Amino acid sequence: MRGKKNNNPFLFKQFQVHHHLCAHKVGFDGVLLGAWTNFTHAKTILDIGSGSGLIALMAAQKNNAAIITAIEIDDDSSIQLEENFISSPWKKQLTGIKTDFLTFEKSQTFDAIVSNPPYFIDALATPVQKRTNARHNTLTEIESFLVKAVSHLNPNGSLSIIIPGNHSSQILSILNRANCYLARLCYVYTKSLELPERILIEAKLIKCDVEEKSLYVYDKEGNYSPEYIKLTNEFYINF
């Protein structure tokens, strides 16, 4: 493994993720999105901005027959992604590509596209440029990203993303302009706040009834809620 080997990878029930080279470490958003996204019937899956490869690995665990492509722009993250894929039980179905998705020219379309996108719209840059590149985008850039993602969907495919609650109206407007229709929404609360901290979105090219749900990560006593444990149980070792 390139650089100093991390002796403490993030351990899941069926795989492990080394992430010490990555701009983004394994975190709540990625696990939540990977656990929530429906990969069941997908034959081809695209993970955009894959980072350590976490969501792609979760997709492989949930659907070990799918062919999964993971795109990552960062050099070090791409290297670590490949290492995590090779050490997993699903290395034959996982492919990493180092590229900028906005210049991704592959004509293939996919049954399922998933992304934990850079969503700190118009925010101040972080001190570390690498982390800034992974996290920050203008609204125009995010629209270009989402429109391109939609263009890679199969007619019956789905696009799944996670966004902050305070950016929902902007993102939903972009999807609407891209002629993409909401299929599922999940409002995620970690504290007793009026607005959700995150929103999980599944969108499709075909108009359908929208399924809306709320997920509370913690119960009133501050313990993980039964709903959150049920959602992530097949991945987290402690559940």
Image (cartoon, rainbow, N blue to C red):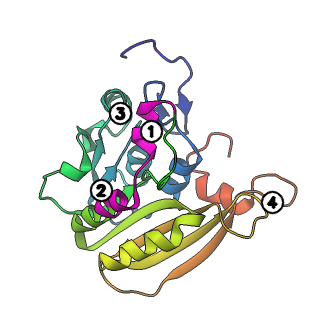
Q: Amino acid at mark 4?
A: Asp
Residue 134 is inside the magenta segment: yes
The kind of residue on which mark 2 rests is Ile
Q: Residues within 10 Å of mark 2 (few under 14, many from 20)?
A: many
Horizontal relation, residue 204 to residue 4: left or right: left
What residue lies at 23% left-to-right and 41% top-to-bottom? 99
What SS does tag 4 mark?
A: loop
Mark 4, other Cα within 10 Å: few <14 / some 14–19 / many ≥20: some
- Badge 1 local density, few (<14 within 10 Å), some, or many (20+)? some
Residue at the disc numbered 4: 219
Picture disc at residue 81: 3
Q: Amino acid at mark 3?
A: Leu
How far is mark 3 from mark 1, CA to CA? 19 Å
**Is 198 in front, or is 231?**
198
- The magenta segment is 127-145
In the rendered structure, does residue 110 fall within the stretch colored magenta? no
Question: In this view of the protein, can residue 42 be seen by the observer?
Answer: no
In the image, taking residue 231 as reference, residue 109 lies left or right, namely left
Query: Within the image, what quadrant is residue 108 found in?
Result: bottom left
Disc ID at residue 45: 2
Q: Give whichever of 156, 132 is nearer the camera.
A: 132
Q: Which mark is first along the chain, 2 or 1?
A: 2
Q: Residues within 10 Å of mark 3 (few under 14, many from 20)?
A: many
Residue flagged by tag 1: what amino acid is it? Thr
